[in-house]
Image (cartoon, rainbow, N blue to C red):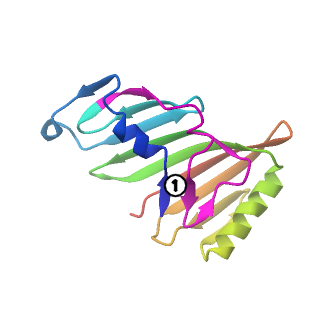
Amino acid sequence: MLRIAALAPLLLLAACDAEVRNPAEGDETVQMKADADGRVAFNLPFAKGEIKLPTGVMSNANFDIDGVKMMPGATLTGFNLDAGKDQPGKVNFTFTAPATPQEVATYFVDQFKAQGVEAAMAAGALQGKTKDGATFLMRFAPQGSGTSGTIELDAKQ
């Protein structure tokens, strides 16, 4: 299961700079996009708008995939969520970590193994499947003395 604590404040703050819509007239598509500064744009069946999350929400986000937490010292720098009635949900995250790409990859491989989650390095990326069947792909690239990473999570089809 994937959890992001940053999404709860988004729904609570949806009234900030929002356009309320009639859900019956929508296509049931859900889209959210956030950047490292906490600016979040959202497009929900019942509202569309933008909010600014409090300082630190992105860097202190409660992130996990089947019990695997973000690497200590890492910071979420953005996320994008797309889901709809006729399409499976897709969530993309970007992050930075204060370790080399190899160290970050090793951290995640070891953590997934400890949680009994199917994951392995293949073609330069960490590929796996959550316990509920969602697939994920993690990529790691050097950035200064640390790592820039991406996580693509596709909901179970």
Residue at the bottom extreme, as displayed: 116
Residue 25 place in picture, x, y as percent: 14, 36
Q: Describe the element under mark 1 as helix, strand or loop.
A: strand
Neighbours of disc 1 within 10 Å: few (<14), some (14-19), many (20+)? many
Three-letter code for the amino acid on which mark 1 is drawn: Leu
Residue shown at the point (56%, 58%) measured from the top left:
64
Q: Is residue 13 above or below residue 94?
A: above
Q: Is residue 40 above or below residue 63?
A: above
Picture quadrant where residue 111 is located: bottom right
Tell me: 82 left or right of 77.
left
Residue shown at the point (78%, 62%) measured from the top left:
106
Residue 100 place in picture, x, y as percent: 83, 49
Residue shown at the point (52%, 32%) measured from the top left:
54
Is any atom of residue 31 visible in this view? no
Residue 87 place in picture, x, y as percent: 33, 52
Picture quadrant where residue 46 is located: top left
Residue 120 place in picture, x, y as percent: 68, 68
2 and 155: which is toward the camera: 2
Tell me: 1 left or right of 37.
left
Residue at the right extreme, as displayed: 145
Picture quadrant where residue 15 is located: top left
The quadrant of the rendering that contains the C terminus is bottom left
96 and 142: which is toward the camera: 96
**Total numbered labels placed on residues in the image:** 1
| Magenta segment includes 63 | yes
What residue did someone put label 1 on? 153
Q: Which range is magenta?
A: 48-76
| Magenta segment includes 90 | no
